[in-house]
Every structure is written in C-alpha cells, then in structure tokens.
Image: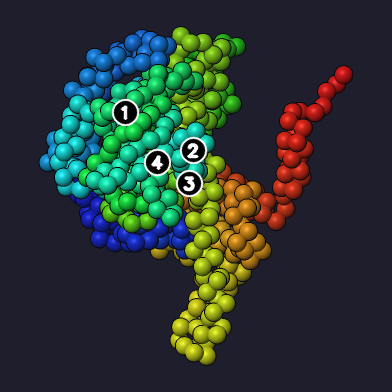
C-alpha cells in the first residue's frame, strides 16, 4: 500500500467530514461519540512535514552539544543574549506567523512538534519560544486588526520583538474576575493604564505585552491591550528565583500611568475575558507538544540507564518492576501525543468549540510528564538525585506544567461543568416541554422523545452509540470500552444534575470524578483512532500501537469504574470534615508525646 497516498486520501476525508461546529468532549456527556471528528486520525500536512525534518535536525544540531551551557543557564537563572539571538536566527519566534509578515506559517500541529523537539533538550528554551508564540503575541494573530498585524507581526516574527502575556496578578490567578489592573478612558480616546502583573514569562526580555485590565463601565469588564515595553511608565522587576525553568525570564511587570492609544485595544472593549480564554485555549498545544518531547527524552534516558546499570549481575532492564515503569511511560507518552495532535487538528481545521478538548490535553499531558519524570529518576536511583545528571532538573522543570495556563484543578472543574452545562439545559427544557405539548405539539413531543430515548438507552444499553468506522477486529474490544463508558458518563451527569441542580457548581469532589472520566474517554478515543490509522497504513509499529490501545483501555476502564462508583459511594463528607478541622486549628494536631 502506498502510505503517502493513503495519508493524503485520509486527510481529504477528514477535512470533508469534520463537523467543525461540534465538540467531541461535550457530546460525550450526552452519550454520543462524534466519530466524524475522531476518524481517521489526522495527518500532518506535507508542507509542514518537509519543514519539520529540516527544523528538528537544526534544533538537534544546535542544542545537542550544549548540555553544560544549558545547565549553567539553569544555575544562574538566565539565557545570555547571544543564545536568544541564536534562537532568533533559527526562526523560532516566527513559527506560526504567516509568510506575509515574515513568519514560517506552520500549523498548530507543526508548531507543537517543534516545541516537542526543543523540550527534548531543555524546557526553558521551549518556554521562551512558547510564551512568545502560544500566548504572548497570539492575541494579535487571533484578534488583531490589519493595521495592528502589519505594525507588530514582522518584528515579532523575526524575534526582534519578543512578546509576553500579562493576565495574572496578586490575588487574581485562576480568578480572572479579580483583576485590579485598570485602564481609564481619557478624553482623547486613549487609556491610562495602572497596575502590576506577576509571574510574567519573558517579562524581562519582552518588547510587547498583551495586557488585560479593567475598563470603565457599569460592569467593569476586562479589555485587552497591546502595550509596548518602551512606553513611559512600563517597568519590570528582577528575575524571579524559581524552582524550575530557571533560565527562562520571569518577572513582575508594572504599569504606572501608561498612556495606551485607542488603536492598541485588542479585540473589542469589554471583551477581554473572551480574548484571554481564546488565547489560552488556542495555545495549549504548545504546552502539550513540549510535554511529549520531554517524555520522549525521559524514556530514552530511562531505557539507556536500565540497560547499562547492573544489579545482582544482571541489567536492571530485566527486572519486572523496571520494565513496568518503562512500559507505562510509553503508554502515557503515546496517549498524550495522540490527544495533543488531535486537538491541534481541531484548531487547524477551524473548529469553533474545542476548549474542553484543549483543557483535557493540557491536564493529561502535564500529569503524564510528571509521572514520567518521577519514574525515570527512580530508575536512575541515586544518580537521579544528583545535579550532575539531568533527572533532577527535568523533575523541577516539569512541575510547573500543572500550574500555569490554568491549574489542573481549575481545568478539571471547567471540563466537568462545561459538559454538564449543556446536559443541564436539556433538563431545564423539560419543564417547559410539558406545557409546549399543548401549544406546540411537534416541539414539545420532540424534546420529550429525545430525552426519553437517551434515558432508555442509558438505562438499558439499547441504542448505545456505536463507532461505525470500519474498525479493525483487533481493536473492537477497545472500542467497546469507550462506547460503554460514554453511556455511563451520560448517566452520571444526569444523576448529579437531578440531585444537585444549580448547586452542582459547589460539588467539586463530584466534578473531579466526572472530569477524570471525560479525560479517559477523550484521550482513549484519540489513542483508538491513532492505532486504527496505523493498522490501515500498514505502519511497522502498528502491533505495538494495538498493545498500547489495549493497555490504555484496560487501565482507563479501572479508573472510570472507580470514579463512577465514587459518585454514589464515597467519603467526601468525612474528607471535608477532616479538612475543616485542620483548617480551623491551622496545623496537624496529633503527636506521640
């Protein structure tokens, strides 16, 4: 079989059948699998593939022999200007900017692959590039006017201007509504900006900031602004002394009576929250790609260590508990890679609703790489704890991933509530549907019959949404798991909404369970799709991909069973009471003396 022809035909098929208005993850809450958006697994466009071969080789040549320099940058907490200039010379600041403005015009999928390559060498390098492209100047790409793009994108593409994203404040991290930075409208139409932002990546080297501030009006809504670092009143603090990603620049950025012209409003006045969320959602593939690159590096380190290190006259690679770690790291990496590039495909294909999928990929990727870092260090044993080996640095660097761009706790709540919101809307609709039967029979019976059909399916299993894609028989059992538990997610969401109603927003223990089931379902379906594609394209690693799909589905099934059972049978109340006691006392209250 001609693999290239197969890939091109599948890409055409994907583009023609993709339902860009639908969210795969949100539809899982209704017991439905939108297989048009999952099969066949997306392929990198040929232009990007050719460029990536050259770019990844160039990145490896540049960074491979710089391990000592990178370690020194980590120690002192700074990247020298000549090093940043080399990144500019390689075109790494213009990856996703169009050719019209001097960029390389890579897709989100290709961009994520570049960050995977840089992350296999050093996370701080990826962060300098990623904070610039993923969030720093992404607002100009997504919401900028033609004039704003013409003015700023060329220098952003060359790296002459580096960008940073300024949202977080003291007391306003995950809670963007608590932002106090203020932009006051002046008589001439300009704004006077005052406030301080904290923990700004690239803060010390950026020439352009995307800043979010509260604007005048009865609602005091957020507005996004493009602010130049050279303007009077813009200052930044010293480099923060961080646990990890130490070589990347992180500072406070202060704005003291900074006059921002009206033409530097980004998007519409008062719509800054929408701008911020769009930027963060659109940029999550960079973080996911970086996590994949880091995991691949960890697997390479762990396998070399396992084969080289001997105990009891045998390589530790022969010991079952070491082999288990390497196998699990591989499953996690394959699953992360499958989900991240599926989400990148949604973004590149113009899907309008992928925020939940983006959140899922970020949560799963950041959790997975931290597990991988832990296990690789464990395989290295005492060496892993020593600074002369790379494990401790990687462990420090990866810890930030579950914190920034939305903490994993907040994103889990977002995943659950976003999915249940639409389910709740159908339950609310039932109340008026009974009355509508008499006033508008077709509409009323339509609502009731759709709900009754879903309830019947959830209760009996009859009518379960089956994946009709021409599935290889070897993957049928894997598909069965995700089909069955998609129905269970629908039942659980219905149960919780009927029990708690609007108070579901306060049930965070339950939201976490629902989110974790959703994560396992979406990631598992991405793994299934990728394994199925590898079989169809006669990939030489297809057999291993089948094994990975089987392993993931069995592990996911056990997790989903535990989470779904926990909805009815749990220790949430006791856990909450215990936390309350410790919080009241302010310390651990027991001792042995």
The answer to whether residue 170 is left or right of residue 134 is right
| Residue under the image location 16 percent in, 45 percent down | 147
* Mark 3, other Cα within 10 Å: few <14 / some 14–19 / many ≥20: few
Residue 182's disc is 4
Secondary structure of residue under mark 3: helix
Compute the Cα span from label 1 to label 2: 24 Å
Does any portion of residue 322 appear in the rendered image?
Answer: yes
- Expressed as whole percent of the image width and height from the top left, the position of residue 475 reads 45, 52
The answer to whether residue 565 is left or right of residue 18 is right
Compute the Cα span from label 1 to label 3: 25 Å
> Pointers 1 and 2 in contact (CB under 8 A)?
no
Quadrant (top left, top right, bottom left, bottom right) of the C terminus: top right
Provide the residue designation for mark 3: 177
Compute the Cα span from label 2 to label 4: 16 Å
| Residue under the image location 62 percent in, 63 percent down | 501
Which sits in the foreground, 4 or 46?
46
Q: Of marks 2 and 4, which one's residue comes earlier in the chain?
A: 2
Compute the Cα span from label 3 to label 2: 9 Å
Residue 65's disc is none
């Amino acid at each position: 079989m001609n693999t290239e022809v197969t890939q091109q035909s599948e890409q055409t098929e994907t583009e023609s059948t993709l339902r860009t208005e639908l969210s795969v993850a949100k539809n899982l809450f209704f017991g439905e699998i939108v297989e048009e958006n999952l099969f066949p697994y997306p392929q990198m466009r040929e232009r990007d593939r050719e460029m990536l071969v050259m770019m990844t080789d160039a990145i490896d040549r540049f960074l491979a022999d710089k391990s000592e320099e990178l370690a020194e940058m980590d120690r002192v907490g700074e990247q020298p200007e000549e090093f940043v200039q080399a990144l500019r010379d390689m075109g790494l600041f213009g990856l996703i900017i169009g050719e019209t403005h001097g960029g390389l015009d890579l897709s989100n999928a290709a961009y994520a692959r570049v960050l995977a390559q840089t992350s296999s060498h050093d996370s701080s390098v990826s962060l300098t590039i990623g904070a610039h492209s993923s969030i720093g100047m992404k607002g100009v790409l997504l919401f900028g006017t033609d004039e704003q793009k013409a003015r700023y994108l060329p220098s952003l593409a060359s790296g002459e201007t580096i960008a940073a994203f300024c949202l977080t404040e003291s007391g306003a991290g995950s809670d963007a509504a608590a932002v106090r930075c203020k932009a006051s409208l002046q008589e001439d139409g300009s704004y006077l900006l005052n406030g301080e932002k904290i923990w700004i990546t690239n803060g010390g080297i950026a020439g352009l900031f995307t800043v979010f501030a509260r604007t005048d009006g009865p609602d005091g809504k957020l507005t996004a602004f493009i602010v130049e670092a050279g303007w009077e009143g813009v200052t930044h603090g010293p480099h923060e002394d961080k646990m990890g990603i130490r070589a990347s620049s992180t500072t406070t950025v202060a704005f003291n009576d900074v006059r921002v012209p009206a033409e530097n409003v980004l998007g519409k006045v008062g719509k800054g929250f929408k701008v911020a969320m769009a930027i963060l959602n659109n940029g999550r593939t960079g973080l996911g790609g970086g996590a994949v690159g880091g995991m691949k590096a960890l697997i390479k380190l762990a396998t070399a260590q396992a084969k080289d290190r001997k105990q009891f006259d045998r390589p530790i690679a022969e010991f079952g508990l070491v082999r288990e770690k390497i196998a699990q790291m591989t499953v996690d990496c394959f699953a992360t890679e499958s989900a991240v590039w599926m989400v990148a495909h949604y973004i590149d294909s113009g899907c309008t609703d992928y925020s939940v999928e983006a959140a899922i990929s970020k949560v799963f990727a950041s959790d997975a790489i931290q597990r991988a870092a832990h296990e690789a260090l464990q395989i290295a044993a005492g060496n892993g704890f020593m600074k002369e080996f790379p494990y401790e640095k990687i462990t420090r660097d990866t810890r930030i991933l579950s914190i920034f761009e939305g903490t994993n706790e907040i994103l889990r709540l977002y995943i659950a509530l976003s999915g249940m919101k639409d389910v709740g809307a159908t339950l609310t609709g039932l109340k008026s549907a009974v009355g509508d039967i008499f006033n508008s029979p077709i509409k009323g019976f339509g609502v009731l019959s759709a709900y009754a059909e879903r309830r019947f399916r959830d209760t009996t299993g009859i009518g379960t949404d089956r994946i009709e894609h021409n599935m290889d028989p070897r993957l049928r059992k894997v598909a069965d798991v995700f089909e069955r538990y998609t129905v269970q997610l629908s039942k659980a969401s219905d149960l919780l909404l009927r029990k708690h109603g609007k108070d579901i927003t306060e049930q965070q223990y339950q939201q976490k369970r629902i989110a974790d089931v959703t994560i396992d379902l979406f990631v598992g379906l991405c793994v299934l799709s990728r394994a199925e594609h590898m079989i169809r394209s006669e990939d030489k690693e297809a057999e291993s991909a089948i094994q990975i799909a089987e392993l993931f589905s069995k592990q996911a099934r056990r997790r989903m069973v535990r989470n779904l059972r926990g909805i009815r049978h749990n220790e949430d109340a006791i856990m909450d009471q215990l936390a309350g006691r410790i919080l009241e006392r302010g310390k651990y209250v027991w001792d042995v003396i």
